[in-house]
């Protein structure tokens, strides 16, 4: 026996039946995004490593521990994107999209790569829907984006979710808060995990991201950013919440919601699902008003969210695909060719048609069609070919009748 080559740990095949569910969910996502004025953007899967170091942030877990980074043949350091926002910002600057009249509203769906510890809801290649709006300072857009995410989940019949919101301040108010937080964290340093001990120095805000019980318990007594916002951030947050109220959305203010990424300013939010277990965030996002400028672009603010599609699909109610199709059963060489022509004709007319080429008798072809859930079976034998009339069986009613090629199409169209 030759050695098998298994899939890489943390990756997952999406098999055809499951892919159908993905397609249905993706279609709803596209429709909702377009309804809110977003347009699709597609950027490369790999980028210069520096883009994520600078964008996602050098003190984030993603950059420290989780990036798939490699050197290409020309000696450049490249990284498979671990998240999408820095790529979109880079693309806007590269293509000077801000000079065009089109709204700076983008969405994207595709794979992301993180060297995470694989577990339920955590993969090394996973998929995200990413939604981003630029050049809108008004907190009304923060609320609109949360409203859109809520509507999207509603359209997908996802229930039992909770919306968490917070503000992480800005360049003006965060540094003094971080200083205070560091002093506090310093006192508890010995009790924190090794990772968090490092964070006390590098970025104590990231301690709130730690999943360890002891660290979370200690962090509960830390000073909260919401009590240290500058006037502008506080006003922004109050207006954001007022707009959420205007939409009639339910939410909980969670002062520890700092999200694992360094670039956020002001608003952060997350929608969690009680059906998900430990990794309970279906989506998360926030505002990042400084990133474009820091990437050498114009001073344009941004806000967005990323939704994990594997997690989303695990909470979307499953529906059996209802696709109709015709199974073409053929008997003998002559009938095979006639069947090939008939199948081609029907496909050109938009009828999904399956023909298999293993030599099998009528009985076994019929039972196969039944097993596959065919809507109709078209029987093509030598007699049928001679007459130019074929037996069409409706599998739901069991009714079988003889028709010409043209009539077959009419019958199918009438019954579908
Ligand atoms: P983040 O980019 O870390 O804010 O994550 C946004 C969303 O992506 C999360 O809420 C999850 O739904 C999803 N996600 C993040 N990391 C993973 C992963 N390793 N595997 C699967 N989904 C993930």
Image: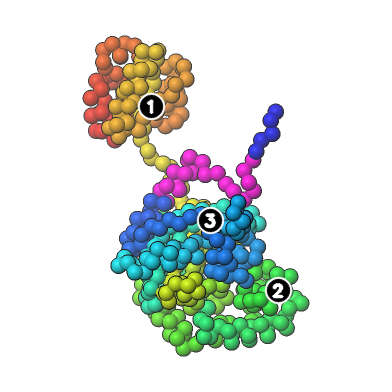
Q: Residue at x 51, y 41 (%)?
A: 15
Q: Position of residue 157 (x, y in %)?
A: 42, 56
Secondary structure under tag 3 reads strand
Residue 208 location, quadrant:
bottom right
**Image side of residue 299 versus residue 346, left or right:** right
Q: Position of residue 69 (x, y in %)?
A: 61, 57
Single out the mark in the foreground, 1 or 3: 3
Could you tell me which quadrant the N terminus lies in?
top right
Location of residue 218 with respect to 414 vertically, above or below: below
Q: Which residue is mark 1?
A: 327
Q: Residue 353 colored magenta?
A: no
Question: Is residue 77 left or right of 127 when viewed as pictured?
Answer: right
Residue drawn at the location 40% of the way across and 25% of the way down: 355
* Residue 248, placed above or below residue 29: below
Whether residue 122 is situated above or below residue 144 in the rendered picture? above
Q: Nearer the viewer, residue 123 or 281?
A: 123
Marking on residue 46: 3
**Does 39 sit left or right of 54 as displayed?**
left
First in sequence: mark 1 or mark 3?
A: 3
Q: Position of residue 324 (x, y in %)?
A: 35, 35
Q: Residue at x 72, y 74 (%)?
A: 197
Residue reaching furthest to the right: 190
**Label 2, label 1: how many angstroms apart (C-alpha)?**
63 Å
Percent x, y for residue 375? 36, 31
Residue 149 visible from this viewpoint? no
Q: Earlier in the sequence, mark 3 or mark 2?
A: 3
On the image, numbered disc 2 is attached to which residue? 198
The residue range painted magenta reads: 6-25
Crowding at dot 1, Cα within 10 Å, few <14 / some 14-19 / many 20+, comes out as many
Separation of residues labelled 1 and 3 (CA atoms):
43 Å
Q: Is residue 401 left or right of residue 92?
A: left
Quarter of the image for residue 367 reads top left
């Amino acid at each position: 026996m030759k050695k098998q080559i298994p899939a890489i740990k943390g990756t997952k095949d999406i098999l055809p039946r499951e892919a159908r569910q993905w397609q249905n969910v993706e279609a709803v996502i596209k429709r909702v995004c377009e309804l809110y004025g977003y347009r699709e953007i597609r950027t490369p899967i790999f980028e210069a490593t520096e883009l994520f170091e600078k964008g996602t942030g050098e003190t984030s877990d993603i950059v420290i521990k989780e990036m798939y980074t490699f050197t290409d043949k020309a000696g450049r350091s490249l990284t498979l994107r671990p998240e999408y926002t820095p790529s979109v910002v880079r693309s806007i600057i590269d293509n000077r999209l801000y000079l065009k009249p089109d709204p700076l509203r983008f969405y994207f769906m595709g794979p992301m790569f993180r060297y995470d510890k694989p577990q339920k809801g955590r993969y090394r290649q996973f998929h995200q829907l990413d939604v981003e709006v630029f050049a809108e300072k008004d907190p009304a857009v923060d609320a609109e984006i949360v409203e859109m995410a809520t509507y999207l989940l509603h359209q997908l019949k996802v229930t039992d979710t909770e919306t968490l919101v917070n503000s992480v301040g800005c360049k003006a108010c965060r540094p003094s808060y971080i200083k205070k937080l560091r002093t506090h964290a310093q006192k508890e340093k010995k009790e924190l995990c090794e990772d968090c001990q490092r964070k006390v120095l590098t970025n104590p805000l990231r301690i709130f991201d730690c999943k360890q019980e002891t660290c979370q318990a200690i962090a509960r007594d830390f000073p909260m950013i919401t009590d240290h916002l500058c006037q502008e951030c506080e006003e922004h947050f109050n207006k954001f919440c007022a707009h959420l109220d205007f939409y009639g959305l339910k939410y909980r203010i969670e002062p520890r919601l700092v999200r694992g990424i360094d670039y956020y300013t002001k608003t952060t939010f997350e929608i969690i699902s009680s059906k998900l277990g430990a990794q309970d965030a279906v989506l998360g996002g926030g505002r990042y008003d400084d990133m474009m400028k820091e990437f050498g672009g114009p001073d344009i603010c941004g806000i967005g969210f990323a939704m994990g599609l594997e997690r989303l699909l695990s909470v979307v109610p499953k529906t059996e695909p209802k696709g109709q199709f015709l199974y073409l059963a053929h008997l003998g060489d002559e009938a095979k060719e006639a069947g090939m022509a008939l199948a081609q004709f029907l496909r050109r007319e938009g009828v999904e048609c399956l023909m298999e080429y293993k030599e099998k008798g009528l009985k076994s072809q019929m039972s196969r069609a039944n097993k596959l859930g065919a809507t109709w079976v078209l029987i093509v034998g030598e007699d049928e070919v001679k007459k130019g009339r074929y037996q069409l069986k409706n599998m739901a009613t069991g009714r079988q009748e003889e028709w010409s090629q043209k009539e077959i199409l009419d019958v199918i169209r009438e019954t579908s």
